[in-house]
């Protein structure tokens, strides 16, 4: 049941995005989108994440046209290849070993949609992340601490990220899945929504 006091709907089942919005003080409901995300490595990463974010927002907006839908899609770009969620632990191990000791970029596209008034705001944020150089057993130990299968690039900055990340340049919440500074700016500017702390 979505109350009228919750004008925002987060179109995501991600506990990390939920935590980010909650910690920022927003009132919102959660409606995970029932869509099949586009997985096409031939599509440029900014376009691909944008397409998926809009796909999720549009799906939820059909049943909630008068609400402000916030949807996002996050991918890792390494060596001109986009890395999504690994299919299994074998692929997760391969992903983290590719990123080991190297620098990659995390892209998140965000779509904010209020269908009833045809309000649509889209943006994307990129963060540069450099991994430490780790031994195989250190990477395996890290994966034993988290569930890498629901995370783009098979890692999570907020879950023992200090074990693998040497440094990051840009939005730290973007790496977790939602660039909060940029989102807060757009919600206030275009929808007059501010946190209720």
Image: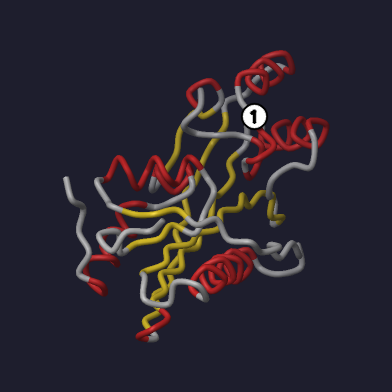
Q: Quadrant of the C terminus?
A: top left
Quadrant location of the N terminus in the rendered image: bottom left
Q: Residue at x 72, y 13 (%)?
A: 137
Which element carries disc 1, helix, strand or loop? Answer: loop
Residue 77: x and y in percent read: 63, 52
- Check disc 1 and report the residue beneath it: 147
Q: Is residue 64 left or right of residue 191?
A: right
Taking the view exactly as shown, the residue that stands out farthest to the front is 1
Name the side, left or right, on which 92 lies relative to 35. right
As drawn, is 92 to the left or to the right of 134? right
> Is 75 above or below relative to 114?
above
Instruction: Say if 23 sits above or below 28 in the image.
Output: above
**Residue sitting at x 25%, y 72%:** 191
Which is nearer the eye, 29 or 130? 29
Q: Position of residue 35 (x, y in %)?
A: 66, 64
Query: Could you say which is closer to the camera, residue 87 or residue 130?
Result: 87
Q: Quadrant of residue 49?
A: bottom right
> What's the residue at 54%, 36% (across, down)?
130
Q: Position of residue 72 (x, y in %)?
A: 50, 59
Can you say whether 32 is above or below 167 in the image? below
| Residue drawn where x is 46% and y is 68% of the image | 111
Q: Going by the picture, which residue comes out furthest to the left? A: 197
């Amino acid at each position: 049941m979505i109350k009228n006091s919750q004008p925002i709907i987060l179109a995501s089942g991600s506990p990390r995005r939920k935590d980010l919005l909650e910690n920022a003080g927003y009132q919102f409901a959660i409606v995970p989108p029932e869509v099949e995300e586009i997985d096409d490595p031939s599509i440029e990463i900014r376009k691909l994440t944008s397409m998926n974010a809009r796909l999720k927002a549009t799906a939820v907006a059909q049943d909630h046209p008068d609400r402000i839908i916030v949807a996002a899609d996050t991918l890792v770009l390494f060596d001109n290849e986009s890395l999504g969620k690994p299919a299994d632990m074998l692929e997760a191990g391969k992903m983290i070993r590719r990123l080991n000791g190297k620098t990659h970029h995390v892209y998140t596209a965000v779509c904010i949609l209020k269908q009833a008034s045809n309000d649509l705001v889209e943006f994307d944020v990129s963060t540069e992340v450099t991994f430490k150089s780790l031994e195989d057993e250190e990477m395996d130990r890290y994966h034993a601490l988290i569930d890498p299968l629901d995370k783009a690039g098979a890692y999570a900055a907020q879950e023992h990220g200090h074990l693998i990340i040497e440094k990051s340049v840009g939005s730290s919440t973007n790496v977790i899945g939602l660039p909060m500074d940029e989102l807060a700016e757009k919600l206030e500017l275009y929808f007059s929504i501010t946190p209720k702390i």
